[in-house]
Amino acid sequence: MRCSSPRSSVEVNTDTLAQSLAVLDDAGDIVGGALNETMPRHDGPPSFRRDDPFLDAVLAFVEPVFALLGAQDAEALKALSVAYPDFRDAHAAGKVGHHFMVARSGALPKSHTFEPVAGTASRYQTLGYAYMMIEATNQWTGAACEALGAARAHFAPFRTRRTVRRSAEPLADTVTSPDGFLSGKDSGSMLYVIRLA
């Protein structure tokens, strides 16, 4: 769905639908997948539909993560576009894919995360994309990127500054952590780029 279309007429995002993948088990049930999109231009903050109870609840929960990844994407896109004219031209032409999210149920082992990442790269090649960008926030996605020969472009650590409210106990409608950092893990998001063409 398009998060910017009005609540009275929510449109299907056919671009994302054409790029995304589902992993099915033997019974045909979805056990994992990859949500993909054309890498946005980051001309400013994304525009989301207002006064949508579901969207408001989801965005309130993920806003600190989106802020970290959005800043990482903007910084990396600028640096890559300056250093590599081919990348800049591909991004301007809408030919940079964004492996936005990989998800799995308990029925799909963590080690199978490689399949949605590799499948996404293959899908983007079929669609004529020149590059694919991935924010790897866990070891499985990072391992898949390394196996595919992706280049490490930018690292955004989780624990450089406090970005969420400090609270020993969970609070309603507020993202919290015991120490105010986004994660307790001393790691972060490694942004990878894969050249597809």
Image (tube, rainbow, N blue to C red):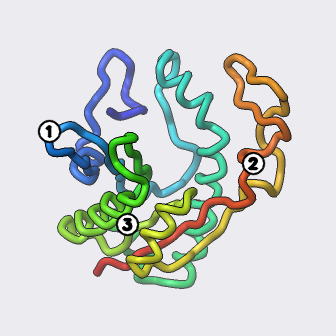
> What's the distance in space between the residues labelled 1 and 2, CA to CA?
37 Å
For this view, does 87 lie left or right of residue 17?
A: right
Residue 88: in sight, yes or no?
no
- Circle 3 packing at 10 Å, graded few (<14), some (14-19), many (20+), is many
* Residue under the image location 59 percent in, 52 percent down: 70
Q: Position of residue 65 (x, y in %)?
A: 62, 45
The C terminus is located in which quarter?
bottom left
Quadrant holding the N terminus: top left
Q: Judge by depth and name the residue closer to the eye, 129 or 170.
A: 170
Residue indicated by mark 3: 96
- Provide residue 21's location: percent of width, then percent of height: 26, 51
Tell me the kind of residue under disc 3. Val
Residue 33 pos. (x, y %): 32, 48
- Circle 2 — which element? loop
Residue at x 14%, y 38% (from the top left corner): 27
**Going by the picture, which residue comes out furthest to the left?**
27
Total marks shown come to: 3
